[in-house]
Amino acid sequence: MIKIGIIGMSPGNAHPSSWSAIINGTYNGKVVQELGFPAVADYLYANQATLGLSGARVTHILTQDKALSQQIARSAGIECIVENPGQMIAAVDAVILARDDAENHREMAAPFIDAGIPLFIDKPLCSNLDDLQYIAAEVAKGKFIMSCSSMRYAGECMTAKAELSSLGKIELITAVGKKDWIKYGVHMLEAIFSIMNDPIPLSVVNTGNENGAIVTINFEGGLQVVVNLFMDISGTFQVSLFGQRSWRLVEIKNSYAMFRDNIIEFIRSVEEGKPRLDFSKTEQIIKTIIAGEESLKQGGKIIFIK
């Protein structure tokens, strides 16, 4: 049995509760709602038949507040509450850092990286080049660090990838989503990179503003991608693929399934002793996210990715 510790939570991020419930096979819908996530309670209820992953269990929880830890523990059947990283390191086989405040990831991850604990860091991995270089250096030393958006494993993306050859050479991809570039642009990029087998980005331009990102990315081979994210837009996450022969619209809706498959990939990675997702793929996506933010700060300047 792989004992997993989970670290949470950041505002608006339900992953500590939902991911723990998916792994442990139990949830308390009332407590999940009290935490402020009624939609999560609904999808856990709807997917009760597939809750629970054999061979793994979330056994320990660490947050910035003991009362919050107790609430999350009740929501997903987590037995042990710890108050510092050292207590968790001594008790678990792997850790999920289930917060999406990327600016804090390096500090929170460092004790587990130093201890050699297999670690999954929720999206986005980080939001600046200094932190990315630190993490890349630790990976180069052989440390087990895995990070991605669950959209990499979305069934809708896998279906689109299977149909890709029927579209002919892809000339243009457009993507539409909601909320901010740092936390949600990574979702759209993970979907696109996954469908297209992780192409190499060359340059990024962000001509949006603080309420909306309009990001154009040029890739090796001539592919152009335009990602549109707006804070108050309605609708689903959508990716449109335009090929020389045909086109496809991909609507990504099944959050539960992609979360579950992402967690399964992490657990399989722990069993195999190394991440099944090559870090270079994550690194390219994070470089693109950072370049998009830098372009906006510089008034829409083109940023070349080295």
Image: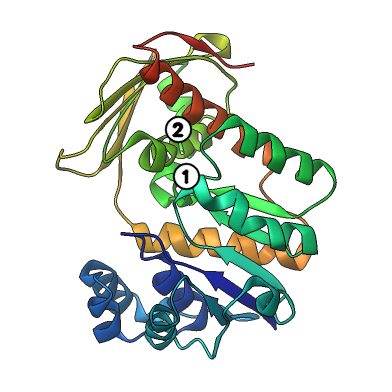
Picture quarter with the N terminus? bottom right
Amino acid type, label 1: Met
Q: Nearer the viewer, mark 2 or mark 1?
A: 2
Q: Which residue is mark 1?
A: 158
Picture quarter with the C terminus? top right
Asked if one can make out residue 205 in the rendered structure from this viewpoint, the answer is yes
Q: Secondary structure at mark 2?
A: helix
Residue under the point 45% across and 21% down: 294
Residue under the point 58% across and 82% down: 82
Who is closer to the viewer here, 44 or 119? 119
Who is closer to the viewer here, 304 or 277? 304
Amino acid type, label 2: Ile
Q: Which residue is mark 2?
A: 192
| Residue 249: percent from left, percent from top | 29, 33
| Residue 184: percent from left, percent from top | 36, 41
Q: Secondary structure at mark 1?
A: helix
Give above or below for 163 relative to 306. Answer: below
Identity of the residue furthest to the right in this view: 141
